[in-house]
Image: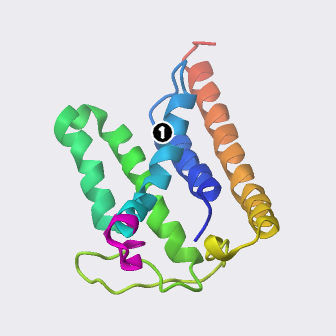
């Protein structure tokens, strides 16, 4: 279970890669993507209210739930904002996928809910498993590791996006 920093950087990276042409306020979509990539953990509210840990990593971490959230703006705004809706929906979906990829302990995620309530985890990287049991030093170490993995990834996506956009503008004589 990665810490919020990893989820946030991954969500922002997805927005940087997919979102339509950046505007003067291009950091706002990045922050929105980082926020959405952490929203699946709002299921902790259900854990707190019901005192049942089984709610965590359940339906809010599934691809179907992410798809439903992706379809809402398409229904409200129509297909004119399809690319934005897909970007934000993918940023949200990244949470469940990242938890799936990195889960070694803790039972995994219900990635394929509602088709199955079975939990799975690929366990490629055991990032910050069970942070509630980690010491402060271990949490700082996990934060540094996640920054070293996901920070450069966001920087690379932003650099590629910048180069591509500059080439598009120069090809059209805008620069």
Answer above or below: position of 154 versus 80.
below
Residue on which disc 1 sits: 32
Q: Is residue 105 above or below residue 145?
A: below
The residue nearer to you, when weighing 133 against 14, is 133
Quadrant for the N terminus, please: bottom right
Quarter of the image for residue 171 reads: top right
Predominant SS along the magenta part: helix
Q: Give me the residue at 45% from left, 48% from top.
A: 36
> Who is closer to the viewer here, 102 or 18?
102
Q: Where's residue 65, x and y in %?
A: 29, 62
For the point 62% across and 62% down, which residue is it?
3
In magenta, the rendered stretch is: 48-61
Question: Which sits in the foreground, 175 or 94?
Answer: 94
45 in relation to 14, above or below? below
Secondary structure under tag 1 reads helix
The residue that appears at 62% across and 71% down in the rendered structure is 132
Q: Is residue 58 magenta?
A: yes
Q: Where residue 83 sits in the image (x, y, percent)?
A: 36, 40
């Amino acid at each position: 279970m990665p810490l919020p920093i990893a989820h946030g950087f991954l969500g922002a990276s997805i927005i940087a890669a997919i979102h339509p042409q950046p505007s003067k306020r291009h950091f706002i979509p990045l922050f929105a993507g980082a926020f959405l990539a952490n929203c699946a953990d709002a299921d902790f509210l259900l854990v707190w209210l019901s005192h049942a840990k089984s709610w965590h990593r359940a339906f809010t971490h599934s691809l179907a739930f992410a798809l439903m959230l992706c379809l809402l703006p398409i229904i409200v705004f129509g297909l004119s904002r399809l690319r934005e809706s897909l970007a934000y929906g993918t940023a949200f979906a990244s949470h469940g996928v990242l938890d799936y990829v990195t889960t070694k302990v803790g039972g995994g995620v219900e990635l394929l809910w509602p088709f199955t309530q079975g939990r799975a985890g690929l366990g490629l990287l055991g990032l910050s498993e069970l942070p509630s049991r980690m010491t402060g030093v271990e949490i700082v170490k996990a934060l540094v590791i996640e920054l070293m993995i996901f920070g450069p990834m966001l920087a690379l996506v932003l650099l590629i996006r910048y180069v591509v956009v500059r080439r598009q503008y120069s090809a059209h004589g805008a620069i």
